[in-house]
Image: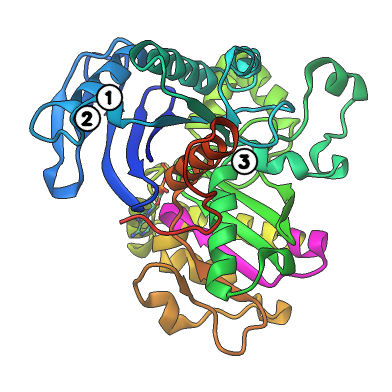
């Protein structure tokens, strides 16, 4: 089965065409700066990648371009759209309605639309992606995979905010979490690497990229996570501040004369690594500056690692222990200096990093020392694969498409 995975962001549209039985990535690409004059489209696998300057007024145009590139031109991957058996859409906000991935029908579309209030840019972009696919491939079944659904298992004590209860009743203000597909994937893979059933493990998963989030996964069930009503909560990130004293918000609005939109912008786009270092949201640039003695860059490093460290401590307390800490995304997979800082001083908790393994490069790997009671594991995330797999499973279950449910997590080429 060939599944087209669509990940529509506010101004971008990433996609992959995946064959599940062959575990093969057939094509991939990204449309960037959708809606601007400088929009462009990258399409194709690694060395065959082509970059096309293209006009894209919106995600509808972007989908049309993607489908054209898949079926024609120098980097075409399939002969016709008939070779696409299903489409899996990544949806950021599934609210209380979706605790798993679902086949898309008009009711699902209406709910995604209703939930757009909680993730305006993302859910609206995803809806345009869904509508465009319906237009170009009316008979192809589609599945929605939600970033939030993995966290629908959180108990009320973890997802409620200590605000007047009526606000929860009136606006459904609560923690929903985000990056759920990534946490689900790395938790499954970590269990496979440890060769233990996930139901026997207490895991702390850390998605450390530009956006950062962590989760406590107790015997396969998510019991807490760092992102909240929106992806602004929790850890310090590239440009997002994460959790801060809420009283700071009215204070800066008053003293700096900022509107709600401006203060939102400040916390989402001008804070985090960028805000503290004044250099960049990219950890590599912050690292280079810190190594040259830039004090604010050093402070940014210290704060970022401390923020992760604090969540490790609190999730150990939430679960009454931890068997493995799993790291993924740009920083988690690649930055040995940050990993060293995160795990330094955690020996009393039975968490010991192996310096040599930490420096080595590789794919999925353990980097804890032999005498560490807690394993530290790096798992490169693969959200697209999870979306393709959910799509495959749902079609098999609901539409009777031939083939078995893929319950193992094979790697893509
Ligand atoms: P996202 O998908 O959330 O945009 P990524 O998972 O690509 O982000 O992570 C981006 C972050 O990873 C950036 O801060 C970048 O500096 C960092 N990163 C990527 N490679 C390295 C590396 N080799 N060393 C240090 N940091 C890295």
Secondary structure state at the residue bearing disc 1: helix
Magenta residue check for 307: no
Q: Are marks 1 and 2 in contact (CB under 8 Å)?
A: yes
Give the foreground label among 2 and 3: 2
The tag earlier along the polypeptide, 2 or 3, is: 2
Q: Which residue extends farthest right?
A: 165
Give the foreground label among 1 and 2: 1
Image disc number at residue 81: 1
Q: To which residue does mark 3 refer?
A: 242
To which quarter of the image does residue 206 belong? bottom right
Magenta part of the protein: which range? Answer: 315-331
| Residue 61 visible somewhere in the drawing | yes
The tag earlier along the polypeptide, 3 or 1, is: 1
Instruction: Tell me which residue sits at (56%, 55%) in the image.
Output: 407
Distance (Cα) linking label 3 and label 1: 42 Å
Image disc number at residue 70: 2
Distance (Cα) linking label 1 and label 2: 8 Å
Residue 49 place in picture, x, y as percent: 15, 40
| Residue 344 visible somewhere in the drawing | no
Question: Which image quarter is the C terminus in?
Answer: bottom left
The tag earlier along the polypeptide, 1 or 2, is: 2
């Amino acid at each position: 089965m060939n599944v087209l995975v669509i990940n529509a962001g506010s101004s971008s549209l990433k996609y992959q065409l995946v064959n599940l039985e062959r575990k093969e990535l057939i094509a991939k690409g990204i449309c960037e700066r959708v809606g601007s004059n400088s929009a462009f489209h990258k399409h194709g696998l690694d060395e065959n990648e082509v970059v096309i300057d293209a006009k894209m007024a919106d995600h509808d145009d972007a989908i049309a371009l993607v489908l054209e590139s898949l079926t024609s031109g120098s980097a075409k991957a399939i002969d016709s759209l008939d070779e696409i058996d299903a489409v899996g859409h990544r949806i950021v906000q599934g609210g209380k309605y979706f605790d798993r991935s679902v086949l898309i029908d008009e009711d699902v579309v209406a709910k995604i639309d209703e939930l757009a209030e909680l993730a305006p840019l993302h859910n609206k972009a995803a809806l345009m992606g869904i509508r465009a696919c319906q237009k170009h491939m009316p008979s192809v079944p589609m599945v929605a995979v939600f970033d939030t659904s993995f966290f629908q298992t959180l108990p009320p004590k973890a997802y409620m905010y200590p605000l007047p209860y009526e606000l929860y009743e009136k606006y459904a203000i609560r923690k929903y979490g985000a990056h759920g597909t990534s946490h689900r994937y790395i938790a499954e893979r970590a269990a496979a690497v440890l060769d233990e059933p996930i139901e026997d493990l207490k895991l702390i998963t850390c998605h450390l990229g530009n956006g950062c989030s962590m989760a406590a996964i107790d015997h396969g069930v998510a019991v807490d996570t760092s992102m909240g009503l929106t992806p602004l909560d929790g850890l310090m990130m590239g440009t997002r501040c994460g959790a801060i004293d809420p009283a700071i918000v009215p204070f800066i609005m008053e003293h700096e004369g900022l509107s709600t939109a401006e203060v939102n912008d400040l916390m989402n786009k001008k804070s985090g690594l960028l805000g503290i270092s004044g250099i960049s949201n990219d950890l590599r640039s912050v690292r280079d500056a810190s190594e040259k003695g830039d004090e604010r860059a050093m402070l940014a490093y210290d704060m970022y690692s401390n923020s992760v460290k604090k969540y490790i401590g609190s999730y150990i307390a939430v679960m009454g222990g931890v068997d493995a800490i799993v790291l993924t995304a740009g920083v988690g997979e690649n930055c040995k200096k940050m990993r060293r800082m995160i795990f330094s001083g955690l020996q009393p908790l039975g968490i010991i990093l192996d310096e040599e393994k930490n420096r080595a490069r590789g794919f999925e790997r353990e980097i804890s020392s032999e005498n560490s009671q807690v394993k530290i594991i790096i798992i490169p995330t693969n959200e697209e694969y999870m979306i393709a797999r959910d799509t495959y499973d749902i079609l098999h279950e609901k539409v009777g498409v031939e083939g078995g449910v893929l319950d193992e997590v094979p790697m893509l080429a």
